[in-house]
Amino acid sequence: MALENLTNCPVCNSTESKLHKTVKDYTVSQEEFNIMQCKNCSFLYTNPRPTPDSLGAYYKSDDYISHTNKSNSPIHLIYKLARTQTLRWKYNLVKKSKPKLLLDYGCGTGHFLTYCKKKGLEVNGFEPDQQARLIAKQTLGESIFSSTTTIKSKFDVITLWHVLEHIPNLNEVVDWLKNHLAENGRLVIAVPNPNAYDAKMYDKYWAAYDVPRHLYHFTKKTLTKLADRHSFSVESIHPMKLDSFYVSLLSNKHKHNQTKPINSFLNGLKSNSYANKKMEYSSLIYVLKHTNV
């Protein structure tokens, strides 16, 4: 499939980078991809990577549950159970800013929007994947935007739950998000954390690298740098504690060809324990606001 090579770091524009590690795509292609590290700002990004036109082919798998919503394996069932448990927690985080109008950017199959709608919020969703968008429409009972060009409103909260790492035109989209966020609004971004203990434990087998679908691999330092570039400030950072268990299951499958549930559970506990003091959980949620707020 067609690949493109980035000549500049997406965060600081430096042309200097070095190989961080080479990781296999275990979900679709079985190809290997390089994760490069910027020598200037330390940002990690997949390079070379699929072109925007060819990227969609790497999502064509029944294992990509956020687009299919199937429950045809134990891992899928665990994912859906975890999602159910986190919906209320996500909503409680979002409601702290007392929003009325919400946009879920990359809403997948629409479960978070459905939950927020039941709580009385006016909700909107954007989802480019046709299959996921259809499921979201059926789940939510409302239309989901297929293109950002038709979205004119400004929102009190815009959420991206494990979406930012997938976006090829990163800076263009962050600018769009800023322009569509109300003056006192909040941008809520959840991304995997390659500084987590489970990432170091599983190394190149760490499932949250998920190349080439994950084009970027944000640490606290580099997400903050991206926010600064677009005149956002990081208001708060929150853990996603259940992710370490799910990621450990997938990582064991990559490394040992079996999920090893007991081992995965213990590794998830260990990762959360190590993360507690430094907020280096398997996934982190960043709440951003306009710098002048």
Image (cartoon, grey):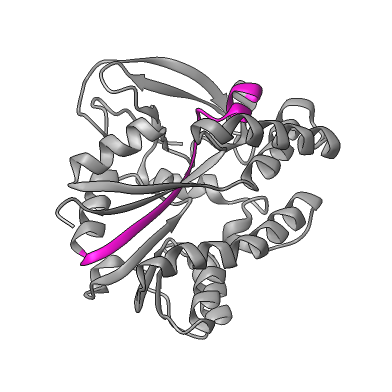
Task: Where is residue 32? Give x, y as percent.
Answer: 55, 25
Q: How many marks?
A: 0
The residue lying toward the viewer, choosing from 135 and 171, is 171
Q: Answer whether residue 1 is visible to the viewer in this image.
A: yes
Task: Where is residue 174? Give x, y as percent.
Answer: 26, 51
Q: Answer whether residue 3 is visible to the viewer in this image.
A: no
Q: In the picture provided, is 157 more to the left or to the right than 205?
A: left
Identify the residue shown where x is 20% and y is 53%.
175
Report the quarter where the C terminus lies. Answer: bottom left
Tell whether position 184 is magenta: yes
Identify the residue shown where x is 19% and y is 46%.
230
Task: Where is residue 17? Give x, y as percent.
Answer: 31, 16
The residue lying toward the viewer, choosing from 262 and 37, is 262
* Range drawn in magenta: 180-202
Relative vertical location of residue 68 with respect to residue 272 in this rendering, above or below = below
Task: Where is residue 198? Give x, y as percent.
Answer: 63, 29
